[in-house]
């Protein structure tokens, strides 16, 4: 008995290319806005080029050496890490608390209202956030110091004192980005199957047990996404701080993105700014990859 | 044969016409000069400041007379240099009329991004015979003269002035404002400092950025005899005893200011002055209208900035318009006609009346206008005797130079560094920057 044979169906050539017609435009756009600037930056990082001072000249690793020996670059990147280390855990804790509170809320209307309100800080233009913060934290006229005064606390020089200014931009960052974490985690909690929730509720009344064994596994993808995105967003932080303090007073709030902007668009030193950008990109990728590997280490 | 009277007259007229001596032979008019450029569009860079609002308001007059369309592109000051530089580097030809701060012309001319003014001035079809460049105050002409050539026509020109609240001064026993910085600190400040009543003698705008460099740091440099550098020896001189004395004085003075002043920009100090919380503030002449139309406006008067131990060196700042070298010749010519019109003697008065500040002596010294706008007299006095064109250095790498001054100047103000330590660090940083970029070769030393 002969085995049945499968006849190869000949797909018209045009059908073979069909998927590319759909993904092609997006791919081209991605290459244009994502890959091209990255390659451009990498190329100029090996050149000495100050805008208006002659054409680019290849200078090997000089820009990288200058970057790694620059006290301004080092202090800006360390300040950015401090900013990240302080703000990210607080955003995660607050975001998780809000997400769990929303999950417990039985009133659908209230839940929807809170979700809408959570979008406001994220949707507000960063420069507007900056202006509002500048007014709110103004030493003479601001509502924050007025509140402190009502509580009998002496006014704080939020904008003029280096430590207070750093604290102020941290608070603003937390206010602006905690809702993002809350919404992502809220979406993760919504994936917990109803029947499992009901079963565990019958099994135990312990909130911790329900959280640890049922909710946390479902939260993990959301937590990873929140940590990775927030790490990237925090390292990239520019607009809010620029509109509030421009990196000042002194260099108290000068994060790495502000430092690179100064080199690129005040010094117009494209070569040096490119090298700093490449190094910052590498640091960001390594950090994000480390977080992903750590959180998924059980599955690796 | 004896020539007849008629033939003599005819001959003379012909000769005069040939030699260009006849009164109407070269009668220049904007309308005629603009005829070949009718329909052209000129893109002009402007700022979100009163002078540009006044210019935009009056622009339709130019468009009506010439048929040239003018498109204004407005930027915040902080973004304007970046926008213009990117325009040039990318050869986008986005802007035709280029706005140059008093500290940028070296960059623009060194890179050949702008057309030398003499090219237009030599063209009889384009140059208004009444342009009268000498009517611009000398300090302004010198500020925009690079290698002996005028490179831009001044517009939106400022002098640092002392605004004071007459009522507050009188209530505290002062018949007028201080003449020197020392008087302000030792006599006025202690008596006027009353934080419980939200009253402060003086506020120094010191926000990080150009405000820190131009309005805060430099203000306490020149009057004490300090200088940024010695061009002859190529040495930064900010750690000199004079510079240390000036910046130490600044530290003493800011103690009498409101808290948070280190982060405050022009808008905040103007607001404080307008609300009657300040007795005095040093601000640009362009803020006169804003201040006098505020709540405390009727009590606000204006005079020249106080003098320092080494004389009066008031803040000096402002802009000039130039023509982009990267746009077609026809557009360049049309752009020149617009710039020439905007900065002309005849436009100075309407511009002033619409809130602009101009550097035209004919308008600024006009007694009727001086009576109407009291800031004009001290402004003129400052430009004639109390300031210098290179109050901030005229070098090709000024923007980053200023960033460093701003960073360390602000660090000194916050107390992160003592004055001598901060200035020593700043000097070392600037010296390294100037040496490594070869910027010493780009210094423009204008005539004082």
Image (spheres, coloured by chain):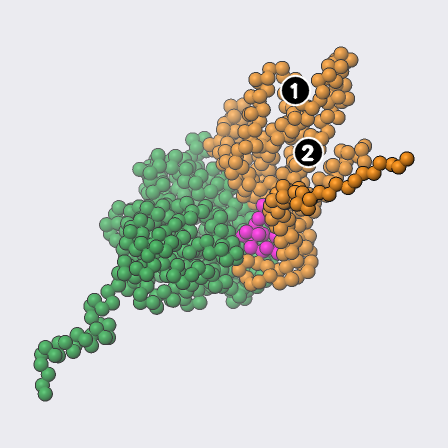
Chain colours: A orange, B green
Q: Residue at x 81, y 32 (%)?
A: A298
Magenta portion: prevailing SS class: helix
Q: Dot 1: few (<14), some (14–19), or many (≥20) neighbours within 10 Å?
A: some
Q: Kindly check if marks 2 and 1 are in contact, taking CB atoms under 8 A apart as contact.
A: no
Q: Which circle marks residue A214 in the picture?
A: none
Judged from the image, the secondary structure of the residue bearing numbered disc 1 is helix
Comparing A277 with B187, the one in front is A277
Up-down relation of residue A39 to residue B127 (above or below): above
Location of the C terminus of chain B by quadrant is bottom left
Up-down relation of residue B430 to residue A172 (above or below): below
Alpha carbon distance from label 2 to label 1: 19 Å
Q: Which residue is mark 2?
A: A225
Q: Please state the horizontal and vertical placement of residue B311, each as a whole percent of the image.
A: 41, 56
Which quarter of the picture shows residue B279?
Answer: top left
> Given the current orientation, which residue lies at the most extreme front position?
A1
- Which label's residue is closer to the chain start, 2 or 1? 1
Which quarter of the picture shows residue A184?
Answer: top right
Task: Find the magenta span and give its range.
Answer: A258-276
- Chain that bears disc 2: A
Judged from the image, the secondary structure of the residue bearing numbered disc 2 is helix
Q: Please state the horizontal and vertical placement of residue A284, each as a whole percent of the image.
A: 68, 43
Q: Dot 2: few (<14), some (14–19), or many (≥20) neighbours within 10 Å?
A: some
Q: Which residue is mark 1?
A: A103
Q: Residue at x 45, y 46 (%)?
A: B76
């Amino acid at each position: 008995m002969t085995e049945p044979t499968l006849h190869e169906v000949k797909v018209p050539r045009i059908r073979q290319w069909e998927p590319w017609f759909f993904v092609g435009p997006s791919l081209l756009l991605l290459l244009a806005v994502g890959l091209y600037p990255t390659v451009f930056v990498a190329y100029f990082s090996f050149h000495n080029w100050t805008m208006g001072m002659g054409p680019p000249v290849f200078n090997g690793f000089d820009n990288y050496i200058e970057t790694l020996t620059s006290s301004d670059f080092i202090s800006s990147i360390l300040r950015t890490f401090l900013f990240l280390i302080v703000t990210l855990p607080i955003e995660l804790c607050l975001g998780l608390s809000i997400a769990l509170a929303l999950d417990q809320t039985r009133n659908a209307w209230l839940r929807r209202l809170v979700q809408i309100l959570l979008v406001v800080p994220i949707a507000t233009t960063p420069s507007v956030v900056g202006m509002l913060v500048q007014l709110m934290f103004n030493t003479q006229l601001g509502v924050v110091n007025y509140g402190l005064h009502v509580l009998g606390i002496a006014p704080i020089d939020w904008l003029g004192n280096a430590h207070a200014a750093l604290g102020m931009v941290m608070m603003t960052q937390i206010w602006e980005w905690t809702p993002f974490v809350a919404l992502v985690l809220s979406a993760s909690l919504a994936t917990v199957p109803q029947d499992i929730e009901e079963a565990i509720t019958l099994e135990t009344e312990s909130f911790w047990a329900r959280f640890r064994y049922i909710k946390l596994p479902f939260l993990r993808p959301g937590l990873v996404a929140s940590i990775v995105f927030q790490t990237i967003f925090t390292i990239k932080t520019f607009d809010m701080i620029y509109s509030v303090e421009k990196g000042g007073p002194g260099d108290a709030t000068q994060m790495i993105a502000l430092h690179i902007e100064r080199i690129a668009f005040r010094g117009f030193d494209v070569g040096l700014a490119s090298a700093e950008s490449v190094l910052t990109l590498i640091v960001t990728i390594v950090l994000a990859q480390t977080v992903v590997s750590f959180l998924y280490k059980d599955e690796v | 044969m004896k020539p007849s009277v008629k033939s003599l007259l005819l001959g003379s007229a012909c000769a005069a016409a040939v030699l260009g001596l006849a009164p109407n032979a070269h009668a220049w008019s904007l309308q005629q000069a603009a005829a070949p450029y009718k329909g052209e569009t000129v893109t002009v860079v402007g700022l979100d400041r009163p002078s540009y609002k006044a210019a935009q308001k009056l622009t339709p007059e130019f468009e009506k007379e010439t048929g040239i369309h003018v498109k204004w592109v407005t930027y915040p000051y902080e973004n304007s240099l970046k926008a213009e530089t990117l325009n040039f580097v990318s050869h986008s030809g986005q802007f035709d009329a280029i706005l140059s701060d008093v500290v940028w012309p070296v960059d623009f001319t060194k890179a050949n991004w702008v057309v030398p003014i003499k090219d237009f001035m030599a063209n009889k079809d384009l140059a208004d015979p009444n342009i009268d460049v000498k009517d611009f105050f000398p300090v302004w002409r010198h500020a925009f003269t690079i290698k002996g050539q005028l490179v831009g026509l001044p517009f939106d020109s400022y002098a640092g002035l002392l605004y004071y609240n007459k009522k507050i001064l009188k209530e505290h026993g002062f018949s007028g404002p201080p003449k020197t910085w020392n008087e302000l600190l030792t006599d006025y400040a202690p008596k006027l400092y009353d934080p419980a009543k939200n009253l402060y003698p003086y506020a120094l705008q010191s926000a990080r950025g150009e405000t820190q460099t131009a309005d805060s740091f430099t203000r306490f440099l020149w009057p004490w005899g300090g200088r940024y550098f010695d061009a002859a020896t190529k040495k930064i001189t900010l750690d000199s005893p004079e510079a240390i004395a000036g910046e130490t004085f600044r530290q003493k003075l800011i103690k009498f200011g409101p808290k948070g002043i280190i982060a405050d920009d022009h808008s905040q100090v103007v607001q404080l002055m307008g609300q009657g919380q300040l007795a005095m503030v040093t601000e640009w002449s362009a803020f006169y209208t804003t201040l006098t139309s505020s709540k405390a406006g009727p009590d606000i008067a204006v005079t020249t900035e106080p003098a320092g131990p080494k004389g009066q060196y008031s803040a000096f700042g402002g802009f000039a318009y130039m023509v982009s070298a990267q746009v077609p010749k026809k557009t360049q010519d049309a752009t020149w006609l617009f710039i020439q019109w905007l900065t002309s003697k005849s436009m100075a008065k309407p511009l002033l009346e619409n809130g602009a500040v101009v550097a035209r002596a004919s308008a600024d010294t006009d007694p009727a206008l001086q009576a109407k706008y009291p800031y004009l007299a001290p402004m003129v006095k400052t430009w004639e005797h109390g300031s210098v064109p290179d109050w901030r250095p005229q070098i090709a790498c000024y923007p980053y130079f200023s960033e460093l001054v701003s960073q360390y100047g602000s660090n000194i103000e916050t107390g992160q560094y003592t004055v001598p330590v901060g200035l020593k660090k700043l000097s070392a940083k600037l010296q390294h920057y100037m040496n490594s970029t070869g910027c010493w070769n780009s210094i423009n030393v204008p005539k004082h």
